[in-house]
Every structure is written in structure tokens, then in C-alpha cells.
Image (cartoon, grey):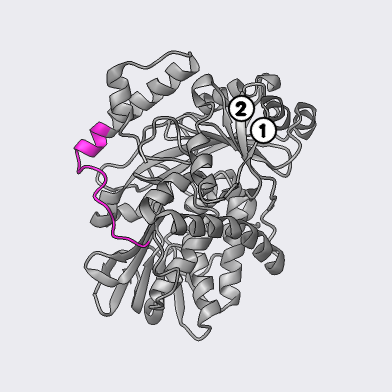
Amino acid sequence: MDVRRNSHWLKEAIAPGEEDCPSLIGDISADVCIVGGGYTGLWSAIQLKQQEPSLDVVVIEKDVCGAGASGRNGGFVLSWWAKFLSLEKICGGEEAVRLAAASAESVDAIGEFCAEEGIDAHYKRDGWLWAATNDSQVDAWNGTAEAAARYQQYPFERWEPGEVGARSGSTRHQAGIFEPTAASVQPAALARGLRQAALARGVKIFENTPMAKLTGRAKSEVTTPKGRIKAAKVILALNAWGVRFAPIHRAIMVASSDIVITDAMPERLEEMGWRDGMTISDGRMLVHYYRTTRDGRIAFGKGGINGRWPYGGKIGTKLDGPTQIADSVLSWLQWTYPELGQVRSADSWMGPIDRSKTGLPYFGALEGQPNTFYAVGYSGNGVGPCHVGGKILASLALEKKDEWANCGLVRPLGRDFPPEPIRYFGGKLVRRAIAATDAAADANRAPGPLTRYLAGFAPAGLSPFKGQKT
């Protein structure tokens, strides 16, 4: 399969005739070897070179930079404010405020970096609407907003229901709360731009170079099909593919996210009142997330609907290519925007999401390998937070004792999900219960007690839903 066809975004972002970085052939050494050429890996590389320009930094990527989650996501550049309750529980109130504020600052920093580097990532800072599309979802945000207010933080604007519907273009939106700091990007264009920025700073990037094996403690060795890298430090920036390592596999579960994108229809969007790049998601457990593009399309995604996840951490190409449920996702777009009538899907794709129990990522040193560092568990909200993640991983690799290396999200990986085969078959039961809970809410009825019980095992997602355990 041609990795460039993993998403509409990647096909759009790679220029015709653009050459890949070379594959690694032979043995080399490096101060830091980063495994994974997406946002986390590239921001880490850029941070390392900015702080220590003389460092020898190498990035290896099994496909091409942006072919993984960084080139397939919805392009929402969000902060951690929506996850403040979980941040507070994990880190304590003051640290939660600091990290949430830092993640909001990263949204602006990404836009500024794109402007400075000449990266045309379609960056638009038009905010994020956390919407309700049925009665059950209304006020799902209250606990989060009230918790932030206890620390004199007010990141959200409460909109009247009429304003929610008018500005989002849909009468399905009954209520909502708005975070103005959020932005949107063409995600693969951002990843490819970061690739170029890293190369310009002297980072060595080897594409089409998968990691076959990682060995060593004091000095690590990364083995690839045609070469080896001896490195003082290793950063695993693998997203969902990190489940190949047992400690990471215990801490996250992998679920699919499926996206369709329509033909361009800027005039119809203008008529509906959806006139900017505002990103929107609803409050269901199997979240819907959607936004417009610069050329007037709607990109509409549904998290976790397909129920496809790997057994035993073997993702392979199971979640590559066009989604098998494009018709279903398109029908939800039409349900959300009945004003559109029938619309056509111009393209579709899917990809894996690394979901942690809390919806927040883990950072730290891999168990038994003190010089190998990980970032995993962004849970569908990584575009903005990966910028913070790059700072954290750079500080860990440089052995700094600063606010990033010692932040509240640097912690041992949890044992949050059961082993196989309980995880695989139990996950299917939980997913059915989640879907049934959402369907009951749409029909304005309560789910049965067994359904409620099983749905209670759902890990956190893009934003809190009613009944979520924090």
C-alpha cells in the first residue's frame, strides 16, 4: 500500500515528485535517536536542536513523516482545558493550571512557528465549540468549567443556544461552550512542515526505516532492516504503535477513528452560517468531531465507532486506508447537518488512536531502560499538546531538572487495561454498550443497567462525557 494514500490530508500535503528522505543503510551513532516522524518526534527533535545545537539528533520513520496519526487526524489544535478535571486529579490544582495554560500557549506557538518558518499548514485560530446534540449532553462541561473557576481560570465562553446553532450552522446543536484559544490546521501539512524545519536545523531523518529491535540500557542500540543506530538516549514517539512494548500496552488501548471529507461547497457553508474555521465536537461517548477546510469542505470524524483494534498490540496495516464505514460516518454528518440534505463523501480514511484511561498522555522513562523515553496516550487530542510533549521529552533526554522534566504528567505507566484475550473481547462488549448508551441518549431514554455498567469502563476521550469517571 502507498502510505501517501493514508489520508486526504497526506495526499494533499506531499508535492508531486517530492522525494523521501533516504533510508538508513549501515551503522551510525547519535546523541539522541527518535523513533517516529510525527508531531511528537519532530517537535522533540526541534526542541533538542534549539536547546543544544551541537547535538547529533536522528529521527527514523517507518513510512514517511506524517504518514501516521499526525497526518490522519481531524486537525484540531486544542488545549488541555477540557481535560482539567483529570489534570487536577493527576497533578494537583496548581500544576493542572500551569499545564493547561501551557497547552493553550502552545496553540499560539504553533501558529507563530508556522509563520516564522513559512509553513502553510492552513492554521486558523477560530476556536473550538464543545456542543450538545441531544438533551443528555447539555451541560456536560459544567464540572470542568466550575473546576477551572475554583482557580480563577475562565477559558470557556458560555453561548446562548441560539448563538450555538447560528454560528455552527446546525439546528442539532442545542447548547455549547466555546474555547477561543483553539485552532485548526491541515495536519499532514503541519507534519511535513515540521519535517522541513527539523532538517534545516541539522536533524538527520531516515524515512522508510522501521525499528526492528531496541536493546541496551546505558547505551541503546536501535536496529533497523539495513542498519543500526547506537544512541545515548532514545525517544519513542510511536503513538498507538507503542503498544508493541509491554509496559505501554498495559497503559493504553488502541481504537479506530474514521473520517470522511466532502466535496468543496463554500457557498452552502456560507448560507448555513458556518463562516470560519471553528472546530466542533459533541458530547457523546463515541465522539463526533468536525470542521471546515480552507477550500470549503467538511471533514467529519467519529471516534471508536468501528470497534477495530489490534489483538496483542499488532497494529500492522489494520487501520490504514479508506474507512470501511464511510456510509455510516457520512450518515452522521447528514444527521448533524440536516440543512445540507444529501452530500457526497469525496474521500475517507481511518487511523489508530492511543487512548489512555484518563485521556491524558504519559511521559517518562521506559521500564528497565532508563535512557529510553516515551510519550503515549494523547487520546485523540495530540496536535496541540505534542508541542508541550516535545518540551517534556527534550528535558528528559537532556537530563534537565526543570518544570518540564518534573511536570505532573511525567509518571510511570499505569496498568490500566487488562491482558489479552480479556482486553480484546471485553473491549468489544464495552464498545457495544457505549454505542447503545449514545443511541439511548439520542432517543431521550435511559440505557439499561447492564449497558450502563459496561459503558462505565470506557476510557476518556476528546472531552469529558456525562458519567465519565475521572
The quarter of the displayed image where residue 15 is located:
bottom right
Q: Residue furthest bottom?
A: 54
- Span of residues in magenta: 410-426
Q: From the viewer's perspective, is residue 169 above or below residue 221?
A: above
User: Does residue 224 appear to the left or right of 368 in the view shown?
Assistant: right
Answer yes or no: is residue 17 visible. Answer: no
Q: Nearer the viewer, residue 67 or 158?
A: 158
Answer yes or no: is residue 366 visible. Answer: yes
| Circle 1/circle 2 CB separation < 8 Å | yes
Sequence order check, earlier mark of 1 and 2: 1
Residue 449: x and y in percent read: 29, 18
- Estimate how packed mark 1 is, as few (under 14), some (14 to 19) or many (20 or more) residues with alpha carbons within 10 Å: some
Give the residue at mark 2: 175
Q: Name the amino acid type tagged 1.
A: Trp
Q: Residue at x 48, y 44 (%)?
A: 147
Give the residue at mark 1: 159
Q: Which secondary structure, mark 1? A: loop
